[in-house]
Amino acid sequence: MTIEKQIFATLSVLAAVFFLFELTNIDIFVQNYFYDEAANGWLLSHEKGSLLDMLFYAGIKKTIIIFGVLILSLYLYSFKASSQALKEYRRGLLIVWLSMAVVPFVIGVLKSLSNVPCPCDIKYFGGEFPYVRVLDVMPVDIIKKFKCYPAGHASGGFALMSLFFLFKEQRNRFIALVFALFVGWSMGIYKMLIGHHYLSHTVITMILAWLLILIIRKISKNIAF
């Protein structure tokens, strides 16, 4: 399948999944499993400096940032005459680095525009506000601006799916993709367990991240190396 067909297929899946969540109550159904109604709280609580914070929030974010700096350093180093071994990976390194920059940025912009409350914000889960999805109209009396959709935290993890285009062998590509999905979903599920995101937020982020990676891959084909 050509890269153009992959982009079109991914865009189609993104649209279908978006409307599936917008027109159903799947998010509420799934989120119920992460909320303890008797205790009026979530299965996990986010505590800064805790082990869970280091593994799935602050720690993993810093690790991804450091990894991005390493990828950029390797890309720049690949232009040195003494780094012939890296030359054949130059395009892949660029794709990974651009993906790690572009994916979180785009997701962040969408978060600032969507104005969608988090699970912990809505009355159904002990919050103060109504359940509002992307296509719903926010009540005029609510002046607070929400930044919960899509899942920004998991975007860094899903950006790692770009590692698929770094490796040459199919086996290594598969391992890289599975690794990225594991990291992204670990970050996404943690945020669901503490009431900061719905399932749709993470799913949409994953698909959108892959779409952006494919677009970056297509653009990179026109860059001379």
Image (cartoon, rainbow, N blue to C red):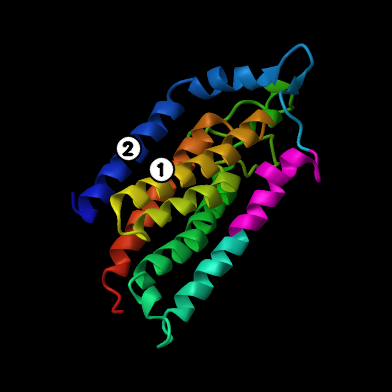
As helix, strand or loop, the secondary structure at mark 1 comes to helix
Q: Is residue 10 magenta?
A: no
Q: Is residue 33 visible?
A: yes
Q: Name the residue: 64% across, 50% down.
A: 60
Range shown magenta: 47-64
Q: Which residue is mark 1?
A: 207
Amino acid type of the residue that numbered disc 2 sits on in the rendered structure: Val
Tag on residue 21? none
In this view, 104 is above or below 219: above
* Residue 45, position as x, y percentages in the image: 76, 31
| Nearer the observer, 173 or 98 | 173
As drawn, the label of residue 13 is: 2
Whether the magenta-drawn stretch holds residue 53 is answered as yes
Q: Residues within 10 Å of mark 2 (few under 14, many from 20)?
A: some
Q: Residue furthest top?
A: 38
In-image side of 139 versus 164 (left or right)? right
Residue under the image location 42 percent in, 24 percent down: 23
Question: Percent position (x, y) of residue 103?
Answer: 48, 55
Q: Secondary structure at mark 2?
A: helix
* Nearer-N-terminus badge (1/2): 2
